[in-house]
Structures are given as C-alpha cells and as structure tokens.
Image (tube, rainbow, N blue to C red):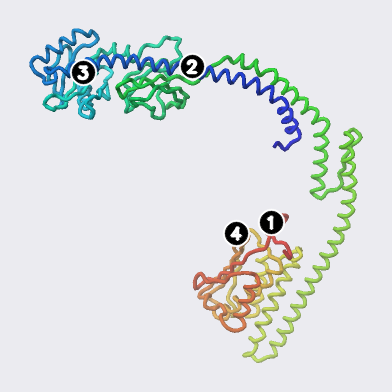
Amino acid sequence: MPSSLRSRLALLLVLANLPAAALAIGATVIGRDAETEQREHSIIQRAELIATRAGLTLGIAEGVADTLAANLAVASGSRDCRAQLERALSQRDEYTGILVAGTDGKIICSAGETKISEESQSSFTRAIRNTEDVGDAVFLPETIPVGDETVPLARAFNAPSGERRAIALLLRRNIFDNIFLPTEPDESEIGALALIRGNGVVVSEFIKGKQDWRPSEPLPVGGRDEGAMGINFLTREGADFHYAVAPVRGTLSSVVLATPLSVITATDWMRFSAAIAAPLLMLLLGIFAVFSGVDHLVLRWITRFRQVAGSYGRGDYSPRIAGLEKAPLELAELGTAINHMAERIRDRSVAAEEALDGKNGLLRELHHRVKNNFQMIASLLALQRRELPQRLRTLLRVPEDRVLAMAAAYKASYATGEIGLVSTSELLRDISGQLRQSFGVAAPAIRIEAGDEAVWLDLDQAVPLGLLVSEILSASMERVDSENSPIAVKIVRPEPSIVHIEVSSEKIADTVPSTGLAARLVSAYRTQISATLTTPSDDVVLIEMPMKSETQASPGRVEFGS
C-alpha cells in the first residue's frame, strides 16, 4: 500500500478506471495471443510438411535398399551384384551411385559414381558398425563435409554369411538440399531452416540474414515417434527464438525451423494503442487533477505542520503555524490545536529543565561529598598507618587503597559533568596513580592504554570494576620486579556491548589472589558486574565485562541506573 496521500488517491483512481482499461487491454492481448499461436502453429506445420516430404524420400530410398538387400546376389556380393545395382540405379535418376560395403569400409560391389570423401566414408562406416537393429536406417553420417557433392542414404542388413553390411544410395547434394532444406521466399518470417541429427550435429542449414539462430540449450531432436513441436529458447547471443522441431520418419534426424519471437509476436501497435488510449488518457487526467488538488489543499499545509513538528522534535518550541485563515477548516483547526499544544509544552519544558538542573546540582553535590568522605576515610587510615610499626603498615595500606579506589569512581563521575557516568580510562589512571603513590619508590611503572573511543560506565559498574582492578594491581605490585616488569593496563572494546581490561606484566598470572580475603573480594566484584576473569597466558590477566544499554543521544555512554 502506498504511504503518501497523493499515491493513495492516484491508486483509487487507477482502481476506478481499471475495469475499462482491463477490458480494452484484455481484448487486444487475447487477439494478439491468438494471432501469435496461429503463427507458431503455421510454422510447426511448415516444419512437419518438410519433414514429411523428406520422410517420403527416405521411404523410397529404404524401399530400394530393402529390395536390393533381399536380392541374394546383392546380399552375398556375388558376380551378379553389380548388374543388380546398375538395374536399380537406372530406375532412379536422383541417385549418382549405389554401393554395398562392410563394417570395415571395404566396398564389396558398386554401380555408378561412388566416390565420397574419406571423412564421409569413415563416418558412414562407423554408423553401420554402431547400428544395432537390422532394420535401422543409417541415414546420413554424423558429419557430412560441406564440400561433398554426394550424401549417402544407407540401410544396414545382415548378409547370408551373418556379416554386417549396408547398402548406400548416393544422393546429389543439390537434390538433398532441395528436399530437406527448400529455399524460403524473401517474405517468409522463417529465420533459419536446418536439418539436425539426433546427436545435435547440424547436417545442413539455410539462414536468412546474419543473426545466429543456434540455441543456447540442446533442442529435443532424435525422437523417432514423437510428433512435431514448438519450443522457445534463447540463442547463444541471447535473442528469443521459436523453434519448430519435426522428426524425419525412420531416422534420428529432425527438421528445425528457427524464427525470431519478435517477428512472430509482431502486431498492429496502432490498433493496440487506440484500444487503450481513451481509458489511459482519462486516468492520466484524473491523476493530474488529484495531484494538483492535493498539493494545493492538503500537502502544502502538511509540509508546514511537518516543519514545525520537526522543530518541536529538536527541542525548539518557538515556531508557530501561520496563515491558518487560508487553510481548509479541518486543517485550520488542527493547526490551531498544534500551536496551543506547543505553548503548553514550552511552559512545561521550562519548568522541567529548571527541576532537572536542580536535581543535577544536588547529585553533583552528593557525589562530591561522597568522594570527600571516602578521601577523609582514606586520610584517617593513612594517619593510623604511619603510627604503626613498619611490619604492620601493610595491614592498613590495603584498606586505604580500596577506599581510594571507590573515591576515584566518584571523583571521575564528578569531573566529567555527566552525572553517574565514569570514563574508564580516567578511573584506571587515578587508581594506578594512587597505588604507585601508596607503594612508594618501589612501585613499578603502570601504563594505561585506551583507544580513540572513550568507554563510559555508570557508577554501578565503575565502583566494582575499580575495586577489582585495584586488587589485581595491588597483588601484582607486591611481587613483580619494579624495574624490569612494568605493568600495562589496556582498555579494549571488541564489541559494542563488551569491554576488555587487559592487565599485562611478567608472570602476572601467578599474582592473582587465590586465597584469603583478597580472593573472596575479587570473586565478589567479578560477580557483581557479571565479568569473567581469565589468564590467557602467564603474562596477561583478562577481565571481560558486559556493558549496559547505551543511550542513543550519547554513543559510547550508558544509561545511569539502566
């Protein structure tokens, strides 16, 4: 169904005029189809007539060959064989000679002119040898050279000795062509006339013009008892042709008439145009009137409504629909309602923005105070740690690092200006810097690697992720060589909904906490953010974490609290 108003009205007009147009077109098409079928049937009859005439000629040849094969002198190849062949040759002027040959190609006896090319004799001999049925007619070798002046029409038989032999009647080439390929008159619509063996070999052809008539697919030739048929194929050049195929009786050959479909389907286009011109003209005038009326009365106002609505969608509620006094009553009432609605929306939008600004200010203040509280707790732990002996200071350093990791998440959220959103790279830089400061001069270097696209997390994910990375870095910094084993933290986003944190250093996989409180905390943090913790190698610890749904307005960021 069309979506635009003009298209739908035009469709209604088309449907209203469709019956009259369909009747006119249908009558013309039916008449043209009937004419096309008649032309195709006429061509098939033409092919069948040529095949029938060829079959009569072959029937006469078969009768002569059968009569000679039944003659004992000819069948045995005795001295009287030549006299019998000369007597038969004197009764048929169209033949130049008659010969009796064996399967080895050796001529046993002959009369008249029996000279044929070596290629024809070889093909003729092969055809005799491959003929299984005694009554089969070896009609035409598979290949008849174009230059041959004679064409052998042969019949296989068994000699009294049981030897396989054949009698061949040699037909003049011009007589053969006149029988099987009669010349078509210039006004004929036939494009090509050909005689084709059952194996697809073209024995002879008559072509009008220069267009290639041969089909791209094999024609159904070679059937003995099948009747004439018509079939449409594409030629090797891609042209549509109609092929009339008529088998020649008693042979595996068929007469083929090839005609371009464009010639067969040609009709009186003036008559066809006149039949559909009136309803088509009425339809076009109706569509033009609908388009003009819809544009003037409806669409120009809808365009104005759409432009104003687009401004409202972008948050600009200042535009108004003007000139409504010239619009149709229904559209004027709709435009007035839209203007009033815009006024109310603008008032409510101003109030909502003021309330949202107040809420955002409260959230910023809350995050700022939470961050300050965490830092105050960390400072108290740091003061307490300095009062302890050197061997016990580690006990308070680890809780201090954990508190600072939580404070880093709120600090990063407050610094971005996006309430509840944390930049992953800034979070990990803050945590790694605090850990190095906590460990002092013995701390190894920590390098944070982030791609061009920023990865944003909400606080629900940022706090547990920061604590998880803090635990892994803290454990690794106690064991690695600070000079020879720097630590690299790489942030990768292989998919829009997945983020990878790769922590790499020499033998870092052995430093992941596996017992005690640190191991339980690592497991708890990983579970909280639905992450997986793996060690692809001894030097890499991989955290794979699913991200929450991204907002459409801020690609790469996630909804707070989603």
Residue 301 appears left or right of 199? right
Q: Are marks 3 and 2 in contact (CB under 8 Å)?
A: no
- Residue 151 rendering spot, x and y as whole percentages: 25, 17
Number of residues whose C-alpha sits closer than 10 Å to that of mark 1, classed few (under 14), some (14–19) or many (20 or more): few
Q: Label 2 belongs to which residue?
A: 39
- Asked if the residue at tag 2 contacts the one at tag 4, i.e. Cβ–Cβ closer than 8 Å, the answer is no
Query: What type is the residue that disc 4 sits on?
Result: Glu
Q: Position of residue 452 (x, y in %)?
A: 63, 58
* Residue ID for mark 1: 555
The answer to which image quadrant residue 227 occupies is top left
Q: Going by the image, does 347 lie left or right of 399?
A: right
The kind of secondary structure element at disc 3 is helix
Nearest the viewer among 527 and 16 is 16
Residue 66's mark? Answer: 3
First of labels 4, 2 by sequence position: 2
User: Where is mark 4, residue-wise?
Assistant: 495
Neighbourhood count class around disc 3 (C-alpha, 10 Å): few under 14, some 14–19, many 20 upward: some
Q: Height in image: 93 above or below 294?
A: above
**Image point (17%, 12%), residue name:** 113
The first of marks 1 and 4 along the sequence is 4
Q: Earlier in the sequence, mark 1 or mark 3?
A: 3
Task: Give the mark nearer the N terminus: 4 vs 3.
Answer: 3
Q: Nearer the viewer, mark 1 or mark 3?
A: 3
